[in-house]
Amino acid sequence: MIESSVKEISKFQSWVLASRPKTLLAAFVPVIIGSALAYADGALNLLAALVALICSILIQAGTNFVNDLYDYLSGADKADREGPTRALAAGLLTTKEMKAGIVINYAVTFLLGLYLVHLGGWLILAIGVLSIIAGIIYTAGPYPLAYNGLGDIFVFIFFGLIGTVGSYYVQTLRISSLSVLSAIPVGALITNILIVNNYRDIEEDKLAGKRTLAVMFGKNFSRIQYLIFMIVSYLIPFLVYFFYKHDFFVFLPLLSLPLGIKLVRMIYSLNGKALNKTLELTAKLSGIYGVLFAAGIIL
């Protein structure tokens, strides 16, 4: 049963809820790290960085809107779901409103992205169009990525590699090996957000026919996957130090390691709704790590 406080929230608040603000750090981190790398190369373009950030946030929000819509239509999201409240499942928005919101969101994203295309050329156009298409087919279309075990790969590639390297490229007009290496912990920690989400929803997803990696390979696989991505993320600063930037500031991300260890313990010990806090903290970790990593690159 939906609580009255949820029913009574405004339409604006409903859209904010549908955007899943706690996940929007996934849009912030790749841009801040890509921009930090551009700054270190003496090529920071603040306007390009800002537009890239807005586009990244809009693509993340649009992906969440599409996810909300098609998880609701498929029956994967219900009002009594274990995860946070979803706008359509809770009756806060109609399917017609959500579809209109998706179109407007991606139209604005495309128009803003034209400035980045002006700077970076056809490669940025291709990245932008692919990002929008991927955000839609993540849960929509005849072969939705999230329903066929491809969600993790999508998140790692688009919010990790493409988000970070693309933000760097649009300011420097080149791709460096350091930008690719730096994108790995970004993708890993953002993918961990999805891993917790799918780990928590494994039983609901089974009933809805949603074949996430957690459903396909089980809980132990998801826990190991989460742990490996965490370990890889904290190994990257050592590679940056030994091969690129011989400065101890690159180890600043290690300040977030206690939270990383806490999260690994949580995913190995919690289940169901108790994992909502793990999900929230995993998103926060990606943001904290990203800020520390960016600072280490700049200093």
Image: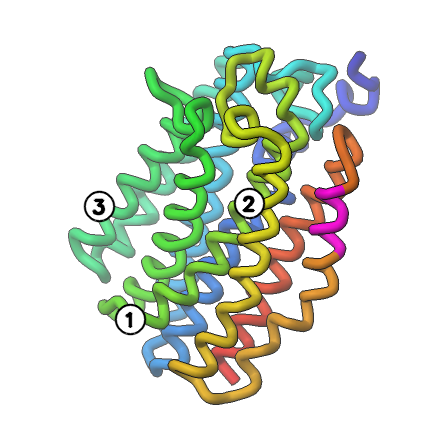
Q: Residue at x 40, y 73 (%)?
A: 37
Marks 2/3: CA distance? 30 Å
At label 3, the amino acid type is: Ala
Work out whether residue 108 or residue 143 is closer to the camera in this orientation and state it. 143
Task: Estimate the x, y position of residue 56 in percent, counting from the top left.
Answer: 43, 49
Residue 165: image location, x then y, percent: 34, 61
Whether residue 91 can be seen here: no
Whichever of callouts 2 and 1 sits on the residue coming sooner in the sequence is 1
Q: Residues within 10 Å of mark 1 (few under 14, many from 20)?
A: some
Q: Residue furthest left?
A: 122
Residues in magenta? 262-268
Residue position for label 1: 176
Q: CA distance from mark 2 to mark 1?
A: 27 Å
The residue drawn where x is 45% and y is 75% is: 239
Choose between 223 and 100: the one closer to the eye.
223
Q: Which residue is mark 2?
A: 225
Q: Residues within 10 Å of mark 2 (few under 14, many from 20)?
A: some
From the top left corner, tell me how far across and down residue 35 is, in percent. 42, 68
Relative to 155, say whether 201 is above or below: above
Q: Nearer the viewer, residue 261 or 97?
A: 261
Q: Residue at x 59, y 38 (%)?
A: 222
Figure coloring:
rainbow
Closest to the observer: 10 or 53? 53
Q: CA distance from mark 1 to mark 3?
A: 19 Å
Q: Are marks 1 and 3 in contact (CB under 8 Å)?
A: no
Q: Which residue is mark 3?
A: 126
- Quick check: 174 above or below 128? below
Which residue is depicted at the point 56% across and 15% down? 72
SS label for mark 3 = helix
Which secondary structure lies at badge 2? helix
Three-letter code, disc 1: Ser
Hey, what amino acid is under mark 2?
Answer: Gln
